[in-house]
Image: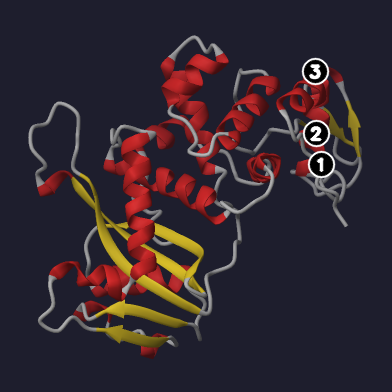
Amino acid sequence: MVIEDYPRTLLELERQFATEEQCRAYLTRLRWLHGFICPRCGGQKGWPARRGRLVCASCQHPTTVTAGTVLQDSHLPLRLWLRAMWYLTSQKNGTSALGLQRILGLGSYQTAWTLLHKLRRAMVRPGRDRLSGRVEVDETQVGGVTPGQKGRGSDSKTLVIIAAEEFGPGIGRIRLARIPDGSAVHLHGFVQGAVTPGSSVHTDGWKPYQGLDRLGYHHAVSKLQGQPVNAATELLPRVHRVAALLKRWLLGTHQGAIAPTQLDYYLDEFTFRFNRRNSRSRGKLFYRLAQQAMQVPAVPYKRLVGGTDNKIHH
Ligand SMILES: [Zn+2]
């Protein structure tokens, strides 16, 4: 059994992560829960060496606790990374890059932005389970408020698809993804990536959803018959509640200033927060983020800036 060890208050954080050595020891425990594994030969014995390195006892390959993770190649102290994780998870709505730059006293906005985006990458747990049971699915338009652009042209809007588990009258877990359009290939692809076959998928009467039965889902369709457009809110109340919260968060915390290519990572952060909204301890969120940061592979800066187009179904 793994004991979840995390600070519960700011003072505990300061005490637990006062030095680089403490931070490194903490991250080492999270990365190698069951003991050191050499990334090159798989050897299970490593020796501590200078400057926080570990040297494999079998092949002599030197490594660090952050090599191969989202923290790789960072010149920032681990103390700063752990404080960024704390700040990000202790705030109910997270923070913008500007907010992070200010609180951590970072020299540049770009540093804060990069740090934040790397942490967002760590918000999707590798190999996470798909949703199950009864799941509502629908799309919504996001964005449309690009700075320096007049009006709310539909071309600056992005289509986001939402899946929300039914949990009694409430919402269980959610999954979100950006999709290029509402065609069957994208809708089906999303459902297959987000929902376990055998589950019941509840949608409106939009034609491209047809065929989910053949993919192994129980497809429940609620149709609008001569009702006002906003009746969709009542047909699929959970996804619409999620959509409203998402839009409020994007406009509130991030002032809506998000490039469509970057939206995926904001969706990941929103999902991370939403699925842990009932977590009794903020420290537990911190623990999850730190743990996942040690498990998610490194991202080159270029790909971080460019966003990605192949992350649509995850
Ligand atoms: Zn080795």
Q: Residue at x 63, y 42 (%)?
A: 289
Q: Nearer the viewer, mark 3 or mark 1?
A: 1
Circle 1 Cα neighbour tier, 10 Å, few/some/many (<14 / 14–19 / ≥20): few
What's the residue type where badge 1 is placed?
Answer: Asp
Q: Secondary structure at mark 2?
A: helix
What's the residue type where badge 3 is placed?
Answer: Arg
Residue 233, x across and y down, in percent: 27, 68
Q: Residue 44: in sight, yes or no?
A: yes
The residue wearing badge 2 is 26
Q: Are marks 3 and 2 in contact (CB under 8 Å)?
A: no
The residue wearing badge 1 is 5
Which mark is drawn over residue 112?
none
Q: Nearer the viewer, residue 197 or 98?
A: 98
**Earlier sequence position, callout 3 versus callout 1:** 1
Q: Are marks 2 and 1 in contact (CB under 8 Å)?
A: yes
Q: Residue at x 11, y 42 (%)?
A: 152
**Earlier sequence position, callout 2 versus callout 1:** 1
What's the residue type where badge 2 is placed?
Answer: Tyr
Q: Compared to 240, does 146 lie above or below?
A: above
The residue wearing badge 3 is 51
Q: Nearer the viewer, residue 11 or 150?
A: 11
Q: Quadrant of residue 215?
A: bottom left
